[in-house]
Image: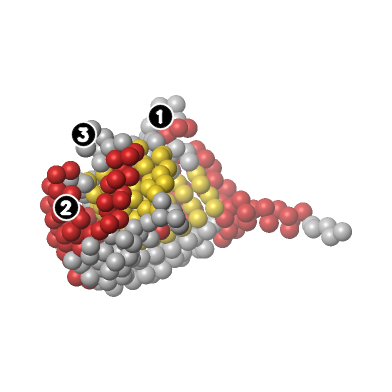
Amino acid sequence: MVVFPPEVLQRASEVRLYEQMALRDPKTAYLACTSVMAHNAYRAAYVRRLWIYQDTRRSSRNQSVPLPPHFWRAIQDALAHMDNLEGLLIHDPSGSNTWVLNSPDFRFQLREASFHLIWDANMVAFLETQHKLRSLSTMDAAEEGPLQPLALDTLQSLEAYNGPVLVVAELLPCPLTHLQIAVDEETAPILPTVVADLGRAKKKLRGLNILYLPEHLVLETLQLISTSVFSSTLRHLGLLSWPVCERHRVHGCLMNFRCLAVMELDLTRWDPQPSLPMQLMLVTELHIYCSSLRHVIFWLGPHRITWSRQEDDQWTNVHLPNRHPVQDNWWRNA
């Protein structure tokens, strides 16, 4: 029987404990960073993925609270010693503490990053140091300021982005293959221009999801996508409101997609809401015009109904309540 010294067992357990750190409340996050920094911060080298966010289910007030500067300084100090960090999620309720990313002592190269932080000079300066980043999620710029531009040769490994349409316009030089774009009332009018630019440049785009797209822009946007350079490679397309009275125009666009396997459609505004037999009829109708479809996802408010084509050509459905499109990652898996 082999007996390992206690220090060997301790190191093995610490490696597993610190390799992935999901810190879901401020107190736990602060104590964890203190632990990482203890004894000359030797544990920091074990950390590969770090998630810092507030799980409101753990709060008596059931809401996120602003965090003091000394909390963010502790996070920044710990990050400066995590040389092997590959994945980082920071959710700041205020979105304003981007200075936590501004340190000359960072030596890690991230592969994945998700920031609930505004897009500003600190964010851009940090991203310009991350040459291996493949997946990114960010917020928009502050309302009162212009969007901070990226250097042209930045993020040349970036394949997936989730964030506002204004930032997408900055990422056009990146080798993007998967995109989730969020628009609002103010930025929706520029979406067709951004989609047109994507349509001229992104031959390898495989997944495209658009959140909160106004119904009056759906057909124009879909037409641009269907005539884009990536129409023959696109495998996932969502989340589009399906105009009840202009279904035939959607059908015409679908005929241009050769590889489209997944389509997400929002039927929330339909009145009455389509029953399951009606949904099956709609799915069959879509498949006639796009024979490559394997999954059709209908959103009815917080309800997601996924229709999947089986090997015997029959369609089956799975209903999941209490969902939100932001939580779904179908677009990433295309």
Q: Determine whether the residue tagged by mark 3 lies in a helix, strand or loop.
A: loop
Marks 3 and 1, how far apart in space? 34 Å
Q: Residue at x 38, y 35 (%)?
A: 322
Image coordinates of residue 60 in percent, x first then y, are 44, 26
Find residue 107 and report its horizontal and vertical position in percent. Answer: 46, 65
Q: Which mark is residue 62?
A: 1
Q: Is residue 126 visible?
A: no
Q: Nearer the viewer, residue 129 or 272?
A: 272
Residue pictured at 70% horizontal, 53% vertical: 10
> Cα distance, mark 1 to mark 2?
46 Å
Instruction: Name the amino acid, label 2.
Output: His
Name the residue that disc number 3 marks.
Answer: 271
Residue 296 percent coordinates (x, y)? 34, 50
The percent position of residue 85, horizontal first and vertical second, equals 49, 60
Residue occupying image coordinates x 17% and y 45%:
243
In the structure shown, which secondary structural element does the residue marked by tag 1 occupy? loop
In the picture, the disc for residue 248 is: 2
